[in-house]
Amino acid sequence: MGINRRGLTSDLVPFVEERLELTSLQVAFQPIFDLGNDSKPFAYEALMRSDDERFVDPPAVIRSSIDRDVCGELGRLMRHLAVEQCRNHPIFLNVHPHEFEDGWLVRPDDPIFRHDHPIYLEITESVPLSHENHCRGTLSEVRANGARLAVDDLGAGYSNLLYIAELEPEIVKLDAGLARAIVRNERSERLVARIVDLCRDMGAEVVAEGIETREQLDAVVRAGCRYGQGFFLGRPQRADFSSA
């Protein structure tokens, strides 16, 4: 399915695609399920996709955007396409650290401010360390205007729960490795349960990522995770929810 350009008034599509030297950019949506509500979709994470064989890996597109100094424009374009194609559901939108430096996110006409449902800006746990000054100021401004925050990859690489306490996200996403580890032994499950309790104590609900089996799903539910995401529950799909 091609990009739905309905309502697109900017010139960002041809501009970004030309600067990146690729033929098309698209968005796929992966559902995030409410595990305590008959496993109904709670929201959809918007994921970058391209049919260009040189850019089938999204990180390659992002690296190219950084090299060509259009990372901010690329992020703005992805947010526009996601909001246009998923008008009637909450959306999770990944934000690259470089986007905190260029000011696009705080523009009053950004697509996230015209969405009728919650928008969660998803950042990795290391972002406050690498772009602390820009990150905190930008997040404060966009959250004051209604956006919400999700911190991704808790438990992968650098882990500092202090940043969860300081940033006060509405959502914390557990790294997919924890979903794999949780079924190996009882101690891993107890560890995840403690992490979930701690996040809730700090006001954040938890999404368990990387759920690929029924065994993993049952384990994260026992550990207290409210939400789940992974191939067992639903794969990313290029779909238009604009009229759903």
Image: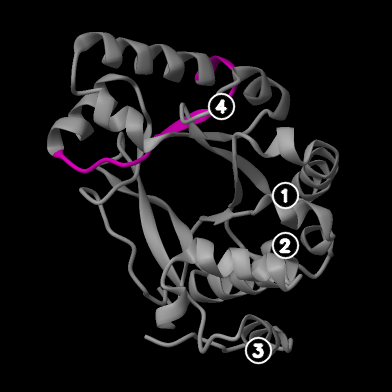
Which residue has dot 1 on it?
Answer: 146
Is 109 inside the magenta-drawn segment? Answer: no
> Are the residues at dot 3 and dot 2 in contact (C-beta closer than 8 Å)?
no
Distance from label 1 to label 2 (Cα)?
7 Å
Which residue has dot 3 on it?
Answer: 18
Q: Nearer the viewer, mark 3 or mark 1?
A: 3
Comes first in the chain, label 3 or label 1: 3
- On screen, residue 175 above or below 112: above
> Are the residues at dot 1 and dot 2 in contact (C-beta closer than 8 Å)?
yes
Q: Which stretch appears magenta? A: 200-213
> Are the residues at dot 3 and dot 1 in contact (C-beta closer than 8 Å)?
no
Q: What's under tag 4, amino acid-wise?
A: Tyr
Q: What's under tag 2, amino acid-wise?
A: Phe
Which residue has dot 4 on it?
Answer: 158
Could you tell me which residue is drawn at 84 percent across and 45 percent down? Answer: 134
- As helix, strand or loop, the secondary structure at mark 3 comes to helix
Question: Is residue 182 visible in this depiction of the protein?
Answer: yes
